[in-house]
Image (cartoon, rainbow, N blue to C red):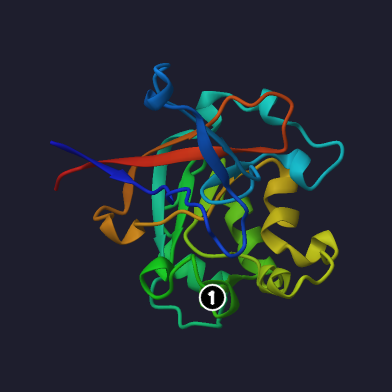
Amino acid sequence: MTRLIDLSTPIRTGHFRWDVERRLAKSHDTGGGQATWAGWNVHAFTHMDSPRHVDPEGFTTDAISLDMTVGPGAVVDVSDVPANTAISAERLAAAGAHLQPGDFALIRTRWDERASIDTPEFWANAPWMTAEGSIWLRERGIKAIGYDFPQDYCIRFFLNGEKRPPLPEHVTQFHLLARGVIMFEYLCNMGSLRQPRNQVIGLPLKLPDSDGAPARVIVMEDEA
Protein backbone atom coordinates (compact mmCIF):
# COMPACT_ATOMS: atom_id res chain seq x y z
CA MET A 1 0.00 0.00 0.00
CA THR A 2 1.13 3.54 -0.78
CA ARG A 3 0.11 6.61 1.19
CA LEU A 4 -0.21 10.01 -0.48
CA ILE A 5 0.60 13.00 1.73
CA ASP A 6 -0.02 16.57 0.61
CA LEU A 7 2.63 19.05 1.81
CA SER A 8 1.09 22.10 0.13
CA THR A 9 -0.14 25.22 1.92
CA PRO A 10 -3.62 26.38 0.81
CA ILE A 11 -3.71 29.69 -1.06
CA ARG A 12 -6.00 31.96 0.91
CA THR A 13 -7.15 35.54 0.53
CA GLY A 14 -6.69 37.95 3.40
CA HIS A 15 -3.18 36.81 4.32
CA PHE A 16 -1.38 39.55 6.24
CA ARG A 17 1.88 39.14 4.32
CA TRP A 18 0.80 38.18 0.80
CA ASP A 19 -1.84 39.85 -1.32
CA VAL A 20 -4.09 37.41 -3.14
CA GLU A 21 -6.66 38.75 -5.57
CA ARG A 22 -9.49 36.35 -6.21
CA ARG A 23 -12.80 37.04 -7.90
CA LEU A 24 -15.32 35.47 -10.21
CA ALA A 25 -14.51 36.26 -13.80
CA LYS A 26 -17.93 34.89 -14.69
CA SER A 27 -20.69 33.25 -12.71
CA HIS A 28 -23.64 30.98 -13.11
CA ASP A 29 -25.87 34.00 -12.46
CA THR A 30 -25.01 35.31 -15.93
CA GLY A 31 -25.60 31.96 -17.58
CA GLY A 32 -22.00 31.53 -18.67
CA GLY A 33 -20.80 28.98 -16.16
CA GLN A 34 -18.34 29.84 -13.40
CA ALA A 35 -14.67 30.82 -13.74
CA THR A 36 -12.42 32.09 -10.95
CA TRP A 37 -9.68 34.64 -11.57
CA ALA A 38 -6.78 34.62 -9.09
CA GLY A 39 -3.41 36.34 -8.84
CA TRP A 40 -0.56 36.47 -6.32
CA ASN A 41 3.23 36.65 -6.01
CA VAL A 42 4.74 33.39 -7.27
CA HIS A 43 6.92 33.30 -4.14
CA ALA A 44 3.94 33.18 -1.80
CA PHE A 45 2.52 30.06 -0.13
CA THR A 46 3.98 26.73 -1.31
CA HIS A 47 6.20 27.50 -4.28
CA MET A 48 9.39 26.60 -6.08
CA ASP A 49 12.38 28.91 -6.50
CA SER A 50 14.59 28.74 -9.55
CA PRO A 51 18.14 30.15 -9.32
CA ARG A 52 17.11 33.27 -11.28
CA HIS A 53 15.33 34.36 -8.09
CA VAL A 54 18.68 35.30 -6.57
CA ASP A 55 21.15 35.25 -9.46
CA PRO A 56 20.68 37.43 -12.57
CA GLU A 57 22.60 34.78 -14.53
CA GLY A 58 20.86 31.82 -12.90
CA PHE A 59 18.62 29.51 -14.89
CA THR A 60 14.88 30.06 -14.98
CA THR A 61 11.96 27.67 -14.72
CA ASP A 62 12.42 26.71 -18.37
CA ALA A 63 15.51 24.73 -17.42
CA ILE A 64 13.86 22.75 -14.64
CA SER A 65 12.83 19.31 -15.83
CA LEU A 66 10.60 16.86 -13.99
CA ASP A 67 13.53 14.72 -12.88
CA MET A 68 14.93 17.75 -11.00
CA THR A 69 11.89 18.03 -8.72
CA VAL A 70 10.58 14.45 -8.57
CA GLY A 71 12.32 11.43 -7.08
CA PRO A 72 13.69 9.82 -3.94
CA GLY A 73 13.24 11.91 -0.83
CA ALA A 74 14.72 11.88 2.65
CA VAL A 75 13.08 13.37 5.74
CA VAL A 76 15.64 15.22 7.83
CA ASP A 77 13.77 15.37 11.13
CA VAL A 78 14.88 18.29 13.28
CA SER A 79 11.45 18.75 14.86
CA ASP A 80 13.05 18.84 18.33
CA VAL A 81 14.64 22.19 17.53
CA PRO A 82 13.26 24.93 19.82
CA ALA A 83 11.77 28.16 18.56
CA ASN A 84 14.22 30.95 17.72
CA THR A 85 17.08 28.48 17.39
CA ALA A 86 19.65 27.97 14.66
CA ILE A 87 19.71 24.58 12.93
CA SER A 88 23.38 23.67 12.91
CA ALA A 89 25.29 21.42 10.56
CA GLU A 90 25.81 19.04 13.47
CA ARG A 91 22.07 18.75 14.07
CA LEU A 92 21.42 18.13 10.37
CA ALA A 93 24.19 15.54 10.20
CA ALA A 94 22.73 13.66 13.17
CA ALA A 95 19.26 13.65 11.57
CA GLY A 96 20.33 13.19 7.96
CA ALA A 97 22.71 10.25 7.91
CA HIS A 98 20.35 8.52 5.46
CA LEU A 99 20.60 11.31 2.84
CA GLN A 100 21.86 10.10 -0.53
CA PRO A 101 23.19 11.97 -3.57
CA GLY A 102 20.33 13.07 -5.79
CA ASP A 103 17.79 13.16 -2.96
CA PHE A 104 15.00 15.64 -2.46
CA ALA A 105 15.68 16.67 1.16
CA LEU A 106 12.66 17.50 3.34
CA ILE A 107 13.75 19.56 6.35
CA ARG A 108 11.08 18.84 8.95
CA THR A 109 10.61 21.09 11.98
CA ARG A 110 6.81 20.72 12.21
CA TRP A 111 6.80 24.46 12.76
CA ASP A 112 3.39 24.72 11.11
CA GLU A 113 2.02 22.74 14.08
CA ARG A 114 3.44 25.28 16.54
CA ALA A 115 2.46 28.49 14.74
CA SER A 116 0.09 29.39 11.91
CA ILE A 117 1.56 30.74 8.70
CA ASP A 118 -1.25 33.30 8.85
CA THR A 119 0.24 34.96 11.95
CA PRO A 120 3.34 37.11 12.56
CA GLU A 121 4.51 34.58 15.17
CA PHE A 122 5.13 31.99 12.45
CA TRP A 123 7.69 34.30 10.89
CA ALA A 124 9.17 36.01 13.92
CA ASN A 125 9.79 33.00 16.17
CA ALA A 126 10.79 30.22 13.78
CA PRO A 127 14.03 28.25 13.84
CA TRP A 128 16.37 28.97 10.96
CA MET A 129 19.05 27.38 8.82
CA THR A 130 22.73 28.21 9.22
CA ALA A 131 25.25 28.73 6.44
CA GLU A 132 27.21 25.71 7.70
CA GLY A 133 24.09 23.55 7.64
CA SER A 134 23.24 24.67 4.12
CA ILE A 135 26.75 23.84 2.94
CA TRP A 136 26.57 20.44 4.63
CA LEU A 137 23.38 19.65 2.71
CA ARG A 138 24.84 20.81 -0.60
CA GLU A 139 27.91 18.66 -0.06
CA ARG A 140 25.64 15.64 0.35
CA GLY A 141 24.69 16.11 -3.32
CA ILE A 142 20.97 16.80 -2.89
CA LYS A 143 19.10 18.00 -5.98
CA ALA A 144 16.15 19.70 -4.30
CA ILE A 145 15.09 20.79 -0.84
CA GLY A 146 11.87 21.72 0.94
CA TYR A 147 11.20 23.47 4.25
CA ASP A 148 8.17 23.72 6.53
CA PHE A 149 9.41 26.94 8.17
CA PRO A 150 10.81 30.33 7.01
CA GLN A 151 14.29 28.96 6.64
CA ASP A 152 16.50 32.07 6.59
CA TYR A 153 16.83 34.18 9.73
CA CYS A 154 16.56 37.44 7.80
CA ILE A 155 13.08 36.57 6.48
CA ARG A 156 11.60 37.73 9.80
CA PHE A 157 12.71 41.28 9.11
CA PHE A 158 10.48 41.51 6.04
CA LEU A 159 7.57 41.86 8.45
CA ASN A 160 8.83 45.31 9.38
CA GLY A 161 9.20 46.42 5.78
CA GLU A 162 12.98 46.50 6.05
CA LYS A 163 15.08 46.54 2.90
CA ARG A 164 16.08 43.11 1.57
CA PRO A 165 19.49 42.26 3.06
CA PRO A 166 22.47 41.14 0.95
CA LEU A 167 22.16 37.68 -0.61
CA PRO A 168 24.72 35.97 1.67
CA GLU A 169 22.38 36.63 4.61
CA HIS A 170 19.81 34.43 2.83
CA VAL A 171 22.03 31.49 3.59
CA THR A 172 19.94 28.78 1.92
CA GLN A 173 19.46 30.82 -1.22
CA PHE A 174 23.15 31.70 -1.34
CA HIS A 175 24.61 28.26 -0.60
CA LEU A 176 21.92 26.06 -2.19
CA LEU A 177 19.61 27.80 -4.66
CA ALA A 178 22.26 29.95 -6.32
CA ARG A 179 24.31 26.77 -6.81
CA GLY A 180 21.55 24.88 -8.56
CA VAL A 181 19.68 23.11 -5.74
CA ILE A 182 15.98 23.59 -6.50
CA MET A 183 14.13 24.99 -3.52
CA PHE A 184 10.55 24.55 -2.31
CA GLU A 185 9.38 26.88 0.43
CA TYR A 186 6.50 26.94 2.93
CA LEU A 187 5.56 23.29 2.94
CA CYS A 188 3.29 21.96 5.66
CA ASN A 189 1.95 18.71 7.10
CA MET A 190 5.35 17.02 7.39
CA GLY A 191 4.21 15.64 10.72
CA SER A 192 2.15 13.15 8.72
CA LEU A 193 5.26 11.55 7.22
CA ARG A 194 6.08 8.20 8.83
CA GLN A 195 9.07 6.93 6.87
CA PRO A 196 12.59 8.39 6.69
CA ARG A 197 12.70 7.79 2.95
CA ASN A 198 9.95 8.24 0.38
CA GLN A 199 9.17 9.54 -3.10
CA VAL A 200 8.62 13.28 -3.48
CA ILE A 201 6.66 14.85 -6.32
CA GLY A 202 7.21 18.59 -6.58
CA LEU A 203 5.21 20.03 -9.45
CA PRO A 204 5.63 23.76 -10.07
CA LEU A 205 3.24 25.36 -12.52
CA LYS A 206 4.69 25.47 -16.02
CA LEU A 207 5.48 29.20 -15.99
CA PRO A 208 8.21 29.79 -18.60
CA ASP A 209 11.13 32.17 -18.10
CA SER A 210 10.31 32.77 -14.44
CA ASP A 211 12.23 33.01 -11.16
CA GLY A 212 9.76 30.67 -9.51
CA ALA A 213 6.27 29.23 -9.61
CA PRO A 214 3.46 28.10 -7.32
CA ALA A 215 3.74 24.38 -6.65
CA ARG A 216 1.89 21.34 -5.39
CA VAL A 217 4.15 19.03 -3.39
CA ILE A 218 3.13 15.52 -2.39
CA VAL A 219 4.89 12.52 -0.95
CA MET A 220 4.35 8.87 -1.86
CA GLU A 221 5.17 6.73 1.13
CA ASP A 222 5.17 2.96 1.36
CA GLU A 223 3.32 1.54 4.34
CA ALA A 224 5.63 -0.24 6.75
Residue shown at the point (14%, 48%) measured from the top left = 224
Residue shown at the point (39%, 19%) measured from the top left = 33
Task: Answer with left or right where residue 199 lies relative to residue 105.
Answer: left
Residue 142 appears in the rendering: no
Figure check: 174 above or below 83 = above
Task: Answer with left or right where residue 60 lies relative to residue 164.
Answer: left
Q: Position of residue 80 (x, y in %)?
A: 39, 77
Figure check: 26 above or below 14 = above
> Quadrant of the rendered structure where residue 28 is?
top left
Q: Position of residue 54 (x, y in %)?
A: 79, 48
Task: Answer with left or right where residue 17 lies relative to residue 188.
Answer: right
SS assignment at label 1:
loop
Residue shown at the point (51%, 48%) measured from the top left = 46
> Quadrant of the rendered structure where residue 78 is?
bottom left
Which one is in front, 118 or 85?
A: 118
Point out the image quarter for the N terminus: top left
Residue shown at the point (33%, 48%) measured from the top left = 197
Residue 83 appears in the rendering: yes
Which one is in front, 62 or 197?
A: 62
Q: Position of residue 209 (x, y in %)?
A: 74, 26
Q: Position of residue 97 (x, y in %)?
A: 42, 59
Which one is in front, 169 or 122?
A: 122
> Quadrant of the rendered structure where residue 167 is?
bottom right
Which one is in front, 123 or 126?
A: 123
Amino acid type assigned to the residue bearing label 1 in the image: Ala
Which residue lies most toward the front here? 30
Q: Can you identify the residue that label 1 sits on? A: 126
